[in-house]
Image: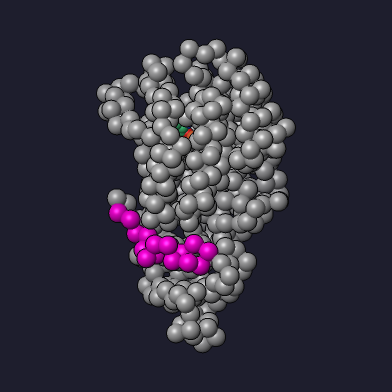
Amino acid sequence: TIVYDAAELVVGPANDVSGGVDAVSVTIEEGSVLDTRSDAAVVIEDGEVAEIGASDELVRQYPIENAATAVDAAERCVLPGFVDAHTHALFVGDRSDEFEAKLRGQTYQEILAEGGGILRTVRNVRDASEEKLRNRLLDHLDVMLAHGTTTVEVKSGYGLNTETELKMLSAIAGGDDGHPVDVVPTFMGAHAIPEGADADDYVDAVVDDQLPAVADQGIAQFCDVFCEEDVFTLEQSRRVLEAGAEHGLTPKIHADEFERLGGTRLAAELGAASADHLLQSTDWDVRALLEAGVTPVLLPGTAFGLGEGYPDLEPYRKRGAVPAVATDFNPNCHAPSPGFAATLACVGMGMTPGEAILGITERGAAAIDRNRASDGAAGTAGTLTVGAPGDLVVIDGPSHRHLPYNFGVNVVETVLKSGEPVVS
Ligand code: NIG
Ligand code: FE
């Protein structure tokens, strides 16, 4: 496979954007975060990027008439396939009436306290067969792929009992097998407290029953918890994540979405792969995350939907760090497009287009331990360097800016997964 004549090719980050201990204090200027090439071509062999270079030269070396697949990317930008690092993409039923209730002034937490929100989706998911769940996930993956997502993290957490959490994770594995998108599974039994249950008793059930069963089946890579006022306390979150780690599941955490309970410090202490939401996090919290090598994940779609404002980028910028950006696709944030998340990251948070693109590619991959810098990563994603998977997105526009610049339309034209055209 050859993709040639690209007006712009986004290779990956131009420098270290993890903001780790060694990162210097710099203000990131547009143009400096992305490594881009013009008039470029990419050759993919055996599913992996084999060569990147000047289009004229590579077309001479690998004549397009000999290629099984040749994609003319003239006046187009070619990017790494998008890595959506935070979704709850396996759900059934819709909550559009809650969307309206929120517009009338009800809050997310009030809806949850009345047995709606997550708890309503839990009832739907418990009633659905595994086959139905898998089919819904496959439908969602089709939409995500059409918007350029080639790797996605999907959480359980609408089961809240062993049987249904396992059913969800099994459907997630089925979705991974049955679809070109790579699906990375996260166990999130600690997503909400089931109706009528005592919080501590439920945490016992997560730790003593759900986690061992999940670990036994080997069907989750990460363990996540919703550390939030009226959901799981910092101590309960610690119990869940430590138990998960003992079972070999890498911690992740929903931290500081509505209240700042200290989840970022817990993530730093436990060496979590990511800490997500971070709407209420302080400069100090962000520093703790970055120094511990925890990838911060911002979810602008959720912030947009809640109408409660966006996080400040300054704590990241002054440390030379770019956070991951993900969709958080779920019934409360019905927005599966990374391009739209990138638009919101730019317009809402003030990210540059280059930062937003890194957020949905290399940074997203870092948040699920799939980037090149992760140790023991099962495959890499989010960059187009030699040896990386041949996961590419071609957009209808000559530069990466055209992704966030367009909204309400899908500018993704062609998607290659492991070098094979899956959207064209
Ligand atoms: O990340 N905040 C917790 N979990 C999801 C929402 C899930 C839902 O409302 O169904 C989130 O936004
Ligand atoms: Fe979430």
Quadrant location of residue 318? top right
Q: Quadrant of ligand 1?
A: top left
Q: Nearer the viewer, residue 76 or 26?
A: 76
Position in image of residue 408 (x %, y %): 29, 50
Q: Is residue 121 visible?
A: no
- Residue 319 in the image: state x and y as whole percent: 61, 46
Q: Is residue 88 above or below residue 354?
A: above
For residue 406, side relative to residue 154 (left or right): left
* Residue at 67% over, 43% down: 293
- Residue 80: tell me if it is visible: yes
Q: Is residue 69 magenta?
A: no
Q: Position of residue 271 (x, y in %)?
A: 69, 37
Q: Main secondary structure of the magenta part?
A: strand
Q: Nearer the viewer, residue 29 or 266?
A: 266
* Image x and y of residue 379, in percent: 63, 56
* Highlighted range, magenta: 409-424
Q: In the image, 126: left or right of 366?
A: left
In-front residue for pair 308/50:
50
Q: Residue furthest bottom?
A: 60
**Tally of numbered discs:** 0
Please state, as top left, top right, bottom left or bottom right, where the C terminus lies in the image: bottom left
* Residue at image coords 38%, 56%: 146
Residue plotted at (51% across, 19% down): 193
Colour logic: one colour
Taking the spot 61% from the left edge, 57% from the top edge, the residue there is 380
Q: Nearer the viewer, residue 402 or 249?
A: 249
Position above or below: 30 against 419: above
Residue 418: say if magenta: yes
